[in-house]
Image (spheres, rainbow, N blue to C red):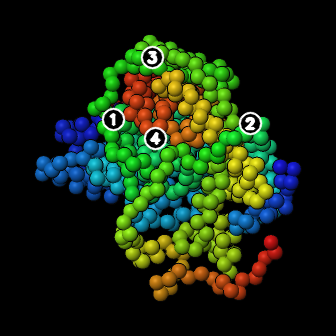
Amino acid sequence: MADLNKETIKKLTQLCRIDCTEEECDAILVDLQKIVEYIEQLQEIDTTDVPPCNHVLEMVNVMRDDEVGGLLDREAFLANAPSHIGGMIKVPPVLKTQEKEV
Amino acid sequence: MYQLSAIELRDAFLKGKYSAVEIVKYYLNRISTYDNQIGAFLQVYEEKALQQAEKLDKKKQNNEKLGKLAGIPFAIKDNILIADELTTCASRFLTNYRAPYNATAIKLLLEEDAILIGKTNMDEFAMGSSTENSALQKTHNPWNLKCTPGGSSGGSAAAVAGRLCPIALGSDTGGSTRQPASFCGVVGYKPTYGRVSRYGLVAFGSSLDQIGPLAISSADVALVMEVIGRNCPHDSTSIQSGPEEYLSDFKPSMQGLKIGVPWKFLKKLADEPKKAFESGIEKAKALGAEIVEVDLDILNSSVAVYYILATAEASTNLARFDGIRYGQRSTRAHNLDEVYDFSKEEGFGPEVKRRILLGTYVLSAGYQDAYYRKAQKVRTLIIKSYQKAFSQCDLIATPVTPFAAFEIGSIKDPLQMYLEDIYSIGINLAGLPAVSFPNQLTQEGKKPLGFQLIGPQMQDRLVLNMAHILEKELPFNYAIPELVKEKTHD
C-alpha cells in the first residue's frame, strides 16, 4: 500500500499494456489509493488454516470425445479482424519494434 | 397490451387475441414513442423482429407445435452474443463487433419461439452500478428521468420498467440484474452459478458471472429459467443437470417456510429502506413464513473481497481485447506494442481501465498473497457463513440496495459506487440464486425499493416460488411509471 505511487501505476500500465496519459495516471493513482486502503481491511480477518476458494461449485473435469466440433469458418472469423490479408490477420511489423524501457 | 406480463402475452397470442406481428408492431411503436427519453436500447431489430413474428404467425396458422416463449419479445443486454448482430458491451472497443455465433441462452430462447427485439445499454463490459459507464449513451430511469436505472443491466431494467418489452436478459456479476431491477421496479434474477451457460456471454468475472432474466413478475422469470437453465457442453462450469420445471411445481403457500434475516448486518440501513424491508418481512410472516435471525456479519468484508477477485478476473479476461483479432485497432499504432497500448487506451473507458489496473495490482508479484490469496480465503469464510445460515433456514431475506435510485452524476467516487453493492455482492461470491422484486415506492420522489430473497445453491425454484407468492402481496403491486402509461385504452 505504502508503495502505491505514480511509478507503480506506470508499471501497471505497462504490465497490462494500456497507454495512459500523465493526467490519467494521476487520477487513477488517487482512486486506487482509496480503494486499496479500503481493501486493506481484509488483513484484520483471521484466515489461519482457511483454504482459498478457487471455485464455488464442486467441479468435475468435463471430458468429451476428441472430435472436431462446430468451428467458425475462416471468413466468419476474419470478418471482425481489423486488418487481414490472404486469409491471415495482418499486424504491424513485430521484429522492428522499438523496445520501450520497462 | 403493455400491462401484460410475458406469460399473459404468450397466452393472448396462443388464444389468438393478438398475432405475433401485432405484438411486435405494438412494442416497436412503444420503443419509438418512449425510448428517446429513456435510452434503454442500443439497437432495435425492427425488420428482423417482424420477420420472426411473421414466421411465427405462419407456424401457428399451420398448427405446428409452438415453443414455450412463443410471441414474447425479448430485449438482450449487449454483452450477450446474437449471431450476425452487433455486440458492443457498450464499449468503444467493440463498436463494430458482430457476433459470429449465438450465445447458448439465445439459442435456447429462439428454439422456444421467443422474438428478439433489440439490444440494451449497460455499463461498459458490465462494470458499474448505474449504466453511466456506457461509452455509447445515457439511460434514464423511467420512474424519474433524472435518476440512473442502476447497473450494469440498466438498459434491460429500464426497458422492462418502461414496458418497451415485457422481459429481458441481463447478466449479474455482483448485483447487475438485481440492483437495476430494484431501481426500476421490476424483477431481476441471479441464478445459481453454473445454472445458465456463460457460452456467448462476454466474460467479466468468470467465477461470478451469470446470465439472468429481468421481468415484470417472478413467474415470468421462472418461465425463462425453464428454458435457459440447463447444462451446456460449451461451458465447463455449467451444472451437470437437466432442465427443471418451475411453474408447474410451484407450491401454493409460504406456510412452514423459514426465512433467515441477518439483522445485525443490516443495522446500518437508513430509515426508509429499513422500514420498507421490515414491512416486507411482516408480510412474509402474515403469509405463514417463520422468521429467524442468522449471522452474516462476514458480509461486511464482501465488497473488499469482490473488488479484489472481480478485478483480478477482469484484468485477465479483458487482456484478450488487444486490437489484433477483433475490436478496434488504433490507427496511431506503428508497431505491435503500440497496437496493444494505443488500442486499449482508446478503446476502454475510465472505469474499465481502473479495474484492469487494480486487478493487475492485486495479482502482481509481491501482492498476490496479501490481496488475491487473502480474498480467496475470506471468500471461503463467506461461503461457510451462508452454509451455516442455511442450516437454520430455507431462504434468506435482505434489501437489494442501501438506497433507492440515485441521480445521474451524483456519485463520482468509485469506492462509494462500489459500496452500493453491499447487499448484492455476497451472493455472487457464494454462487447462490437470488431474486430482487419490487417492494414499495419511497414517500418522496416515488422511487421503487426492492426486496431480495436468497437461496442455497440449486434452490432456484424455491427462491422464485416464494418471490412469486410474496410479490403479489407487497404495496408496489406491479406499478407502472406514469411516464409510459397510455392515456387511452389499448
Q: Badge 4 is on which residue?
A: B191
Q: Is B468 left, or right, of B77 in this rendering?
A: left
Looking at the image, tell me whether mark 4 or mark 1 is earlier in sequence order: 4
Foreground: disc 2 or disc 1: 2
The residue sitting at 43% across, 34% down in the picture is B459
Looking at the image, tell me whether mark 1 or mark 3 is earlier in sequence order: 1
Q: Which mark is residue B246?
A: 1
State the quadrant of the N terminus of chain B.
top left
Give x and y (percent) for residue B312: 66, 54
Residue type beneath disc 1 = Tyr
Local crowd size for mark 2, using a 10 Å CA cut-off: few (<14), some (14–19), many (≥20): few
Residue type beneath disc 4 = Pro
Q: Does B209 sit above or below residue B466?
A: below
Give x and y (percent) for residue B122: 54, 49
The answer to whether residue B102 shows anywhere in this view is: yes
Foreground: disc 4 or disc 2: 2
Distance between mark 3 and mark 2 Cα atoms: 34 Å
Q: Which mark is residue A45?
A: 2
